[in-house]
Image: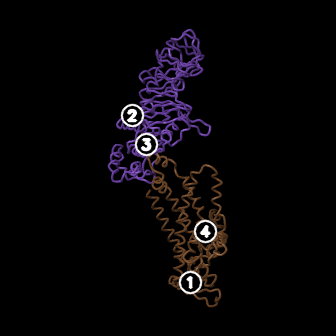
Amino acid sequence: MSFRARMMTPLLVVFVAAIGYPLISSFVLSLTNYRITRRDETKFVAFAQYKDVLQDHAYWSALAVTGTFIVFAVALELSIGLMIALALQNQRRFRDFSRSFLLSPMFVTPIAVGLMFRFLLNQQLGAIPAILEKVGITYDFFGPGRAIYSMVIIDVWQWTPFMVLLLLAGLESLSKQPFEAAKVDGASPFYTFRRVTVPMLAPILTVAVLIRSLDASKVFEYVYAITRGGPGTETQTIQYFTYQTGIQFFRLGKASAMSYLLLIMVISLVILLFKRIEKARLAS
Amino acid sequence: MSAVFLNQVEKLYGSVPAVRGIDLEIPDGKFTVLVGPSGCGKTTTLRMIAGLESVTSGSIFIGDKDVTALDPKDRDISMVFQNYALYPHLSVAENIAFPLLARGAKRAEVQGRIEEVATTLSIFQLLNRKPKELSGGQQQRVAIGRAIARSPRVFLFDEPLSNLDAKLRVEMRTELLRLQRELSTTAVYVTHDQEEAMTLSDVMVVMKDGLIRQMGRPEEIYENPIDTFVAEFVGSPRMNLIRGRVEGGVFKSPSGVSVMVPYSAHHEVVLGVRPEDVVLDLDPANGMPGRLEIVELLGPRAIVNIMCGTHRITAVIEISQLTGLHEGREVGINFRVGRTHFFEAESGLRINF
């Protein structure tokens, strides 16, 4: 065995044990009708579970809920994040303090954030509805038609700082000269933003959106801590639905098939996006 | 077109002065070059005219308009930057159109202007390319194109040629001059290269340590440098400066140089003589004796280094006069009559007779 191969062996062993084995094992599971409560009835069903999942209305509805969550959360995080990053870029005093202060929500574990907002926004006990009540507004944050957007707000609260961090680093890495040229050329701040800042920042914006979207697609803790998918199935995201199927209803075979389908969708999207980024990079 | 006036303009970075209260009048329609060693405040001065740097005190006028507190966009200027500062994501055509579109022109209106500019600068075939696909010289042309797309009152150039190779620099220099003559727009140009300053300028402004040392036509400055700094800085190879003492109408240096002076006071002085005003004689007895050290050929002329006592003197001579001269040979050194300069030893200021 060459030196190089030997140096890589520990990593490969860990990789195979920690990622390869569960991946293969869950794929094998997804080809069976495995249920924890009826293990003796387990039999090989090939892709029947996949077919089943694809025909399951609830699966598609969970996907749609997740999609809505991602679109709103990432769009808000991107626009608010960009605004904050632009403001911080021009800040002169207390830079380090305000930056680290702004980033703090990122360091709270998501389940804690979920619990925190569960109490803050709870209609009977929460501080925020109580304050709103005083000014004459009655608003149930987790009521029908609203709960998913409240989840979005929570995600925005926790993850906008991450956007700020990425975009600020991006902004500060841009060459200053085109911006000076734009000033001399008579561009207004808005024109400069639209025609210089955004296009020059585009690669970083794309990566930021990609990272946040992938991360948001995993949303689970807020749902688990607050709504458990309700009201009805309005906040039943794909991760929560898969968790319910596999862990609460013990249908691990079906849950594995769901996970694999999601994996395929996400990977296809990522590959498509990277191809586009690469194409854009070559074009410029 | 407009003249530019700087009144007691000062720039401090924290407590460090970059420009120390200068007065400057940049004449209308002329090519003015600010030149000086790095850190002399020339770029800061240009950037203050552009509005990219604030003015600590004093005022700047373009024409009769006080622009001291105005944004760059309201000063009606264009600028060419040292590193071109092109918009990397825009094509050449879009780069040239940018100042027009930014000021509210419609796309349909600017097409003709883009083509005109591209033709003037011979970059027509590059219009659809991105800056990344261009060579340094081509990028600089685009940057110039962007600057002339509008007809601003003042062009500002911040060392625009310093990133180009020597041959291209000379070519672009000629082209810039041609363009400026054609447009006769007031131009302010910053460079650390005195040769560039000499060739380009109608008016040359020599700066040092945040102050203007001398200002005038380049040949005036070359002929009558106001002090030893300007004398040494302007001209290549640099002026020979020899420290010594005038006694009874004769300048004598400790290194053995002696020259007759139309000047009688007893005085510590610095004698200056341009390399082209040093004349060599094959007979060491005719003039101050010296030993030829190094000969550098420059084509039609040669730079010759001669040791005169302990002093090294540089001379520039025609190649035809090089016959019989070789490294190590003893020669006689003379300075052309009336072509010597004298400066006060203490202050470095010129002594006029």
How crowded is the residue under tag 2: few (<14 C-alpha within 10 Å), some, or many (20+)?
some
* Spatial separation of the CA atoms under disc 2 and disc 3: 14 Å
Q: Residues within 10 Å of mark 1 (few under 14, many from 20)?
A: many
Question: Callout 3: residue from which chain?
Answer: B
- Badge 2 is on which residue? B29
Q: Residue at x 61, y 75 (%)?
A: A223
Whole-number angstrom distance, CA of label 3 to CA of label 1? 69 Å
The location of residue B304, given as percent across then percent down, is 49, 24
Q: Are marks 2 and 1 in contact (CB under 8 Å)?
A: no
Reading the image, the residue beneath label 4 is: A135
Whether callout 1 and callout 4 share a subunit is answered yes
Looking at this view, is B301 or B97 the one in front? B97
Which amino acid, by three-letter code, is at mark 1?
Leu
Residue corresponding to mark 1: A31
Q: Colour of chain B?
A: purple
Question: Separation of disc 2 and disc 1 at Cα?
Answer: 83 Å
Residue indicated by mark 3: B78
Mark 1 and mark 4 in contact? Answer it, CB < 8 Å.
Answer: no
* Whether marks 2 and 1 lie on the same chain: no
Q: Secondary structure at mark 3?
A: strand
Residue situated in front as seen by the camera: A137 or B156: A137
Relative to A211, residue B202 above or below: above
Residue B151 seen in the current view: yes
Q: Secondary structure at mark 4?
A: loop
